[in-house]
Image (tube, helix red, strand yellow):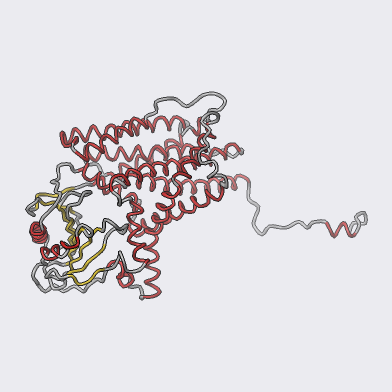
């Protein structure tokens, strides 16, 4: 002990703690932090792409009609025509294990059949029940798979998208908790002054106004996606891994196959059972399993216009006698929540006005997601920790995704180019190029212009391919909407200049 230091002072001197970890160099720490931020940006990009594709997917039925305007349209169909159509489809595809017969509705005005025999075909029929051809709405299916699976293997994709929904739910809740004055300032907006402040105000205002929608969509997305994981977990604990047993209360019992020939199911009698229940119960989809055998099952999904559930499911025998109702609409809260989650998530209730509202609120959610990342990157720079590569990468994602989405539609309509590759490959190239060269403002203006031109090109190619059909009913509405978006997105004016202009690296 040093004699010059009093004992009490020496004992009070703090002891120096020794870390059990080896000392890391500042360069290594910067690299790790950069990687950490990069992973965060990847997660934000997935959220953004799911939100963007989900906004488009709200109008999936309209897009299918736009993509196939020549397909025969029907407002109603007779039970005998349905019977003839189903028998013709089964005769043409005798080995298919599952056949789905869709009846004409306001959203999907076709008599159609989905064949599940390894080649997903959609056949369409006329008013007499004759098969008149097949339709291929490949780009619309691409949008569905992008939003639901991110083009990953289906089970993995559902889980990833479910996790994206869970992350978005957490961001929405934490955003409210982090802004205690968010409701008081719900209508405050600083139009003049720094672009950063007006961007933050736009982010916060859209977050408040769209909060109920954003939360419901995010929560139901997480619920739908992660239900797959939950089902496997419950099956492993309670049913020795038998998932079918766990899902039976929701999807029905899977019957054992019996290939012994039997009379074809009587769909005329099946549909006649619903006649007294209309318009409160409207049959929309008939699911046939192994038709023409003793192991056949006949299930009918019927819409309930006065209920939020997507459908009620009824099972019939081969003679058209109702065996049981699954009870999605009235058999316990759990079933009703499950059956209501799909309409709430996709906006498939209330007709076109609800879809338009979902579309506008979906755009707002995309803006909130994009501006949230931009605000975070701006604050990093203001605090002396700039990340120029991340800033440029995010610019490429924010405007590259809609650009390549429109490009995939152009090339599919023009030359049948696979939409999956046309979307992901150019987007990856745009991100890599943005990181390597130029600044963010260059990519913002360039990709906005590319998006606008691609949207206009979609309409031009659609008109060139379908002629007068491109101006009929639904197709005209879709084309006018695309042209309006092209005008709105086009970079008509340069970014503001002056002392309050946002830095060029974040001019998104």
Is residue 285 depicted above or below 378 in this figure?
Answer: below
Instruction: Indicate left or right for 206 with 7 as reference.
Output: left
Number of numbered discs visible in the structure rendering: 0
Image quadrant where residue 185 sits: top right
Q: Which residue is outermost to the top?
A: 498
Residue drawn where x is 24% and y is 58% of the image: 303
Where residue 194 appears, as percent x and y from the top left, is 55, 30
Q: Position of residue 111 (x, y in %)?
A: 14, 53
Q: Residue at x 42, y 25 (%)?
A: 493
Tell me if residue 399 can be seen: yes
- The correct choice, above or below, for 383 with respect to 143 in the image is above
Pick the front one: 88 or 488: 488
Above or below: residue 154 compared with residue 51: below
- Report whether 199 appears left or right of 229: right
Residue 388 screen position, x and y as percent: 52, 37
Q: Where is residue 413 in the image (x, y as percent from the top left)?
A: 22, 39
329 w.r.t. 206: above or below: below
- Among all residues in the image, which is located at the extreme right? 3
Instruction: Residue at 55%, 51% (x, y): give it.
Output: 177
């Amino acid at each position: 002990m040093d004699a010059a230091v009093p004992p009490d002072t020496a004992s009070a001197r703090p002891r120096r703690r020794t870390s059990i970890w080896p000392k890391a160099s500042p360069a290594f720490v910067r690299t790790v932090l950069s990687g950490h931020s990069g992973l965060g940006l990847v997660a934000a990009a997935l959220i953004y792409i799911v939100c963007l594709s989900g906004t488009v997917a709200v109008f999936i039925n309209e897009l299918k009609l736009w993509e196939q305007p020549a397909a025969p349209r029907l407002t109603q169909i007779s039970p005998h025509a349905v019977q003839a159509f189903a028998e013709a489809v089964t005769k043409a595809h005798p080995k298919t294990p599952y056949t789905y017969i869709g009846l004409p509705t306001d959203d999907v005005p076709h008599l159609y059949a989905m064949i599940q025999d390894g080649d997903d075909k959609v056949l369409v029929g006329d008013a007499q029940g004759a098969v008149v051809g097949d339709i291929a709405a490949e780009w619309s299916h691409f949008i569905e798979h992008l939003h639901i699976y991110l083009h990953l293997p289906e089970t993995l994709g559902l889980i990833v998208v479910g996790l994206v929904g869970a992350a978005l739910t957490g961001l929405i809740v934490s955003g409210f908790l982090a802004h205690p004055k968010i409701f008081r300032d719900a209508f405050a907006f600083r139009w003049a002054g720094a672009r950063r402040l007006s961007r933050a105000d736009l982010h916060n205002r859209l977050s408040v106004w769209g909060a109920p929608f954003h939360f419901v969509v995010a929560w139901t997305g997480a619920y739908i996606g992660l239900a797959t994981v939950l089902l496997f977990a419950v099956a492993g604990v309670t049913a020795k891994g038998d998932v079918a047993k766990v899902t039976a209360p929701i999807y029905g019992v899977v019957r054992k196959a019996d290939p012994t020939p039997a009379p074809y199911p009587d769909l005329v009698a099946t549909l006649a059972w619903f006649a007294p229940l209309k318009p409160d119960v409207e049959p929309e989809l008939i699911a046939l399993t192994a038709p023409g055998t003793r192991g056949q099952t006949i299930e009918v999904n019927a819409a309930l216009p006065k209920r939020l559930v997507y459908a009620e499911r009824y099972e019939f025998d081969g003679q058209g006698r109702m065996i049981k109702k699954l009870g999605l609409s009235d058999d316990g809260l759990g079933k009703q929540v499950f059956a209501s989650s799909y309409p709430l998530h996709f906006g498939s209730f209330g007709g076109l006005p609800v879809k338009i509202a979902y579309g506008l609120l979906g755009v707002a959610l995309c803006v909130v997601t994009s501006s949230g990342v931009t605000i975070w990157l701006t604050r990093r720079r203001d605090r002396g920790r700039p990340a120029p590569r991340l800033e440029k990468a995010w610019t490429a994602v924010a405007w590259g995704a809609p650009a390549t989405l429109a490009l995939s539609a152009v090339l599919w309509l023009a030359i049948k180019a696979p939409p999956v590759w046309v979307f992901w490959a150019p987007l990856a190239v745009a991100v890599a190029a943005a990181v390597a060269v130029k600044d963010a403002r260059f990519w913002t203006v360039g990709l906005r212009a590319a998006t606008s031109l691609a949207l206009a090109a979609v309409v031009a190619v659609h008109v060139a391919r379908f002629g007068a059909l491109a101006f009929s009913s639904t197709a005209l509405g879709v084309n006018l909407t695309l042209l309006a978006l092209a005008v709105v997105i086009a970079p008509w004016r340069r970014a503001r200049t002056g002392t309050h202009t946002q830095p060029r690296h974040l001019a998104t």
